[in-house]
Each structure stands twice: as structure tokens, then as C-alpha cells.
Image: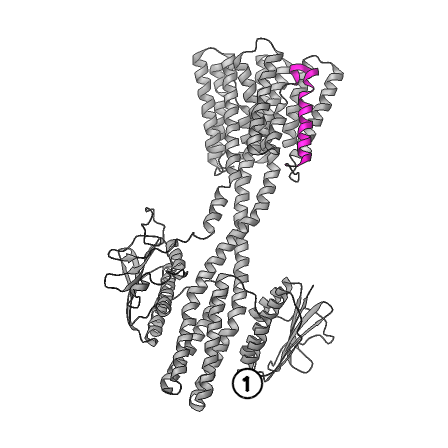
Amino acid sequence: MVVAVFWVDGAILILKVWQSGQGAWRTGLAFVLLASTVYIQMAYFSRPASWLRSPRSFALLAMQAGLIYLPLLMFDSSWNGLQNFLAGSVLLVLPPVAAWLLFVAVVATVPLLQYAMIVNVGPIFLLYNLLGSAVVGIAVYLLSRLAGLVGELHTARDDLAQLAVADERLRFARDLHDLLGLSLSAITLKGELAHRLVHARPERANQEVTELLDVARLALADVRSVARGYQDLSLEQEARSAKAVLAASDIDTRLDLEYQDLSVPVITTLAAVLHEGVTNVLRHSKAERCEIVVHQAAGEVSVDILNDGVSDENDNGPDAGGGSGIRNLSTRVAELSGWTTAGLEPDGRFRLRVVIPCATEKFESEDPPAGTFGGRSGKGTRSTTVPSDPGPPGAAIRERTTSPVHARSTAVLISLFFAGDVLIAVLHLMVLTKDPVKLVSGIDFLTALLILQLAYVNRVGSRPRSGLSYVLLLVQACLIYLPLIQLGPVWISQPGFLAGSALLMLSPLWGWTVFCAVVASVAWVHVIATGQAYDILFNCGTAVISGLIVFGVMSLTKLIAELVETRTQLAKMAISEERLRFARDLHDLLGLSLSAVTLKSDLTLRLLDIDPDKAAKELLEILDLARQALADVRSVAGSYRELSLDDEYRSAQSVLAAADVRVRMDVEDTELPVLVRTVLAVVLRESVTNVLRHSKAEHCDIVIRQTDGEVSLDIVNDGVARAEPLSASGAKGPAVVTGSGIRNLSYRVAKLGGELQTGLDKDGRFRLRVSLPVQ
């Protein structure tokens, strides 16, 4: 299409040279010069891979200017008008300000040269040439930009995907913090309490460890749940858990739940509010009483958490010092059109209040006043203003997706092209007729044609090959042909609008049929009007060019919208990949810690009556594991961390020994790249977790060796009854992979170019082997 437009436009100029009586050899020379100009435009300026801001581009721009202006000395006014190629190239090559200034200068040379070469040229004719050159120059830019714009949109999709990934990581981090923070805090609290009671009140210590074991199992289930995807929290379960944890801290708690038939997002968010609110009471206050009230009325549901543990010196309450918990909650609540307040009541108690509409549609309300997070403040409160969250990157993504800057500027140029084309027709009409009735009538028809073109045909949301499209295409044909009855030969229409719209709105067969019929109708009208060959050829060529340009610029609009939608889909795919990667890291990072807490809690229960001193020692290790798990939660919520392989050796040995598994460690002290050490640490964690969960091992060997640019990790245990045997040669064949943990590990190992194998050795022991390159 672009080639056809450029060459047909050039053919019209050759026709002008021939018609001016320049002779055969001069016409041939004009063809060579024209071919060189069009070749530069097609082969370089319209090629997506071209570097348009390079010395070569500037040199070719100067060469094109010479090919356009120097032949004027030979061909006079018949060569004038080729400046549209240079005008379009200027917009492509130069910076915006300089480009538009030079664009205006180049376009202005057309009427100036026309005035200098032809005597008695009227102002309307000069304005006609000025607008014609500007409109065609914009068309050259748009068509040259067509392929390049496709390339730019494709390269921009990575940026959009990264923003979408950042948004997903932020949401996952908030959910992780809200879901596991309270459980791990409760484990730490109950562990400390049980440790103090081991010798003084063993019965109470037994009860606390039992509850600790339940919380640890629940936290482990939560990890698996988050690793599978977002979970729907139970508000009642969270309320009961919160009350139990507060009671264990000697906080007098009143719980009042009054709600029914809430949507899953609302219930999940309210449960997260309870998580964070109770966590703040435990961490940041010295409360003696706490009141939790959930109330539903008038289409809204509210959660109030009040406590008396905030002093005047710290009247800003939880999170005022820069914590992220309440800010995270306020973001989640605002997504459901709710609001959050936090501050001291007149009676000195600190209140965290969240209100969410039962229906989750967005409010069309004014901005919330100061002192609230996402909404209005309750009466009588001394509210704390927490620094506003800038919001998830998803907001920026949606903005970039729906209205990228280059799409807006291209849409403006397309509108200018159509408006300029119609204005040229109006000027032509003013030259042909002085009858005010015909002039006004023709302007009305042209205005209606422009409105139809911009309002529907060129709109992104228009539906090709629909009933409405066919009707409006018929209306467009009427606006083009019916004025011939009233205006006759003075009617200057826009048949290219109909020809280009037919290509876009109809099937290919019917579209090209209508296109050819429109061009034929133009030839027929001018045969009747003048009968001159030059006039017929000129107007037919103009109809072909304008029809193809209309089709091209409308296709450009549709293409931009389609590629924007494609970028959105690619971003969603990137989100899915990030969810999977985050779930793997979460499972690998926390699975072992929580499994160890569960195992040691069960062991402590058995030891409380038999050996209180050893039970106390186990409780101290439980506290260390719980604190480490909580640190891991914060680490993962912030960003992925570099795991310490040395720490994992010691942790694995300690945990396996606590499970009465005899461990042999044979580890070479070698320098390894960070990514390799991190993956080996994750493999070690997951493998030890599998030994604890899925086997009845008595012996476990952990061996790390580095040879010939490769490091290997072998973890062997005797507790698996059945598995596929390794090959006799130990060759690196396909891994025997079962369960999501091993699948996750195999993925991570493969990302670094390594291999993972599982199976039985000849002696019946189960071996997990990982080999990784270290260069």
C-alpha cells in the first residue's frame, strides 16, 4: 500500500512533466530523479530498522532535499510539489521542535515557488497548494511511520510488562505480610510464654505448646495456599484466632461480629484488616483491653479495633513511625472503594476503623479529607495522617496502556490529515463557483462527510462488517455522489474517503470491488465534464492515492489499538510468570522453617513431661526458627533475598538431627557465584523438607563437590521405599520429578543451565542430585 501511494504520487508528477512538453529525455531524467527520491523514502526512512537520528539520516535528508529542489532549475513549475516527501522525512528525522519548524518552511516553499514561476496566481490557489503540500506531507510521515510504529510498540511491551510485574509483586507482598505476620508473631509469643512456664506451670506450658503447634500448622497451610494463589480468608476464623492470641497476651478482649452475605473480596479484606490490626496491638502497644467490632448496616460493613495501650507520647499509634502495615491495608481497602482511619478517641483509646461498601463498585465521590486513608474520617477522632501510598504501579500501567503518547500524537495528525483534505476541497470549490447557494451547500456536504469519517469510520471502536457499518458506508456514498445532482461539475467531492473506508469496512473482495468502482466513477465524471486525458488520469490517480492513504491511516489507528491490547495481554502473561516465580520462592523459603517449627513443637510436647530442660531448649530453637521465618516473610515481601548456603548447611543439620536423622555433611569450601549459591541453598531447603515430610529416613548424606567448571549437590537418604532408579551409568538423563517442590527446583536449576535428577541408587537409597555450571 505504501509503495503504491508513493509511486502513484510520483507518477502524477511525471505526468505533469510530460504534459508540460519537456520532451522524452527530460521526462526520462525526471523519472530517474523521482525514482531516487522515492527509493530513499522507501528503503531508508520507511524502514523500521533505520536509525533516524544518525549522520546517515541527515546525509540522506540533505540528498533528498537536493533531488527535490535542484531539478526545479530544469523543470520549472512542473517539478514543484514534490516537497511533500521532504516534509514527511523532516518530521521523521529531526527533533520535534526543529522538525515542525522546518516542516512549515518546506511546505511554504510550494506556494512561494508557484508564485515566483507563474504570473497572476491568486491567493486561494496559493493557499490550495500550501494546504495540499502540508496534507500530503503528513500522509508521507504517517505512512513512513507505519512500520516503525509497530516496532516501537513491540519494544515498549517489555516496559509495560515490568510495571505489571512490579504491581503483582506489590500485591503479593501485601498479602504475604497480612496472611503470615500474625501467625508467626503468635508462634513467637506462645513460644516465649511456654518457655517461661516449662518449669513453673508445666500444664499451662503444655497447653501453650499445643496451641503453638496448631498455629504453626495453620501457617504452613497458609504458605501452601498462597503458593497456589490468593486465598479467601474466613473472617470468623480470623476473629477467633485474634481473640485467642490476644487472650494469650493477657489482653481482655471483646469480640462482636454482626454481618451477613458479604462478597469474597470484602470478607478477605476484612480478615486481612483483623490480621494487621491485632498484629499492631501485639507489637506496638501495651494494651490491657481490646475491642473488635464488625458491624454491617446501610450498605456498608465496618471493622473497629480499639485498644488502650497507646500512650500520649506515641499518640500517632501504630505505623506512625513509618511502618507499612496500615498503609498496605489502606491501599487494599481503597481498591474496594472503602476508607481507613487511625487515631486516638476522646477517651484515650486508639481506634483503627475500616469501612467498606458491601457492593464493591467504585464510588464517584469527592476526594477524602485529610486524616483518612482513601475516605472520610469518623467524627470525634483525632485522626492520624499516614503518608499517602502512591498507589500500585498498575495505575500507571493502565494509563500507559489506554493512551500512550505516540498514539495520541498520531491520532491528532490523522485528524489534521482528514480536516486538511476537506479544507482543500472547500478551497477548490471556492475557485470553481461564485454562487453562494452552491458554495454553502457544498461546504455542508463536505462538513458532514468529515464528521462521519472522524466520528465513526476512523474511530477505534467502530465495528467493520456490521450492519451499522454498511448503513454508514451507504450514507457516505450518498454524501459523495448525490451533490452531483445539485452542483454538477463544480462539485469537488472526496471519493478517496469512500474507497479507503470500503477497504476497511468490507470483506477484501467487496472492498476492492468498491474501490475500483469508485475510481471508475471518478474517470466517468471527468470524461463527461472535460474529456481531457490529462484531467482524467490526474483525478483517477488522485482518487487512488487518497483512497489508499485513507485506508492506511485508518489501519494505523486500528493497529495502534490492537497492539496496545496485545501489550496488555503480554503484561498479563508476565504477571502469571511472576506469580509462579513468587510462589516457588515462597514455598522454598518458608516451607522448611514452618515444617521445622511444627516438628519441634510436636517433639516439645512429648518432652514436657519427660525432660523439661530439653523441652525448654527445643522451645528456644522454635523461637529462633519463628523469628527467622518472620524475617523471611519481611524479606520476601520486600524483595527476593540472597540465601546463605552456609546457614542452610547448619539449619539442615540441626533440623534433621532434631528428627533423629543421622546426618553426614561433606561440603567443599569453594567460591561460587551468588546465583549458584542461592539456588543450591533453595535446593537444600526443599530437599530437607522432603526428607522430613515424605520419608522415614534414619541416615542422610549431604555432599557438595566442584570439578571442571561444575558444582554438584547430592542429598541421599534411606527413607524412601519406592522410586525410579537412576541410570546405571549415572548419566544425566531426564529427572524423575514428582510433587510441586521438586518441579519448582527443576525449573530453577534449568534457568541456570543446570540439571536435576531424582531416583534410587543401586543400594536402595534415594538420591537427589543437582549439577550447575559455575562459569
**In the image, is 727 to the left or to the right of 565?**
right
Which residue matches tag 1?
660
Mark 1 is on which residue type? Answer: Asp
Which residue, as the protein is rendered here, is positioned at the far right? Answer: 25
Where's the C terminus, which quadrant?
bottom right
Tell me the quarter of the picture where residue 702 sits: bottom right
Q: Is residue 54 magenta?
A: yes
Which residue, as the protein is rendered here, is positioned at the far top? Answer: 120
- Give x and y (percent) for residue 23: 73, 14
Where's the N terminus, which quadrant?
top right
Q: Is residue 36 magenta?
A: no
Q: Is residue 181 above or below residue 494?
A: below
Which residue, as the protein is rendered here, is positioned at the far bottom? Answer: 610
Q: For numbered disc 1, what is the local secondary structure?
A: loop
Nearer to us in this view, 627 or 593: 627
- Give x and y (percent) for residue 765: 64, 81
Q: Is residue 122 above or below residue 2?
A: above
Nearer to us in this view, 335 or 187: 187
Count of numbered tags: 1
Q: Which residues are magenta?
A: 53-79
> Can the viewer see residue 489?
no
> Can the viewer see residue 110?
yes
Q: Which residue corresponds to the image point at 55% horizontal and 29% vertical from the top-left?
A: 100
Q: Which residue corresponds to the image point at 47% horizontal and 60% vertical from the top-left?
A: 172
Q: Main secondary structure of the magenta part?
A: helix
Q: Residues within 10 Å of mark 1 (few under 14, many from 20)?
A: few
- Give x and y (percent) for residue 598: 47, 78
Tell me the quarter of the picture where residue 740 sits: bottom right
- Give x and y (percent) for residue 191: 42, 78
Q: Is residue 469 above or below residue 658?
A: above
Q: Which residue corresponds to the image point at 61% horizontal and 11% vertical from the top-left?
A: 118
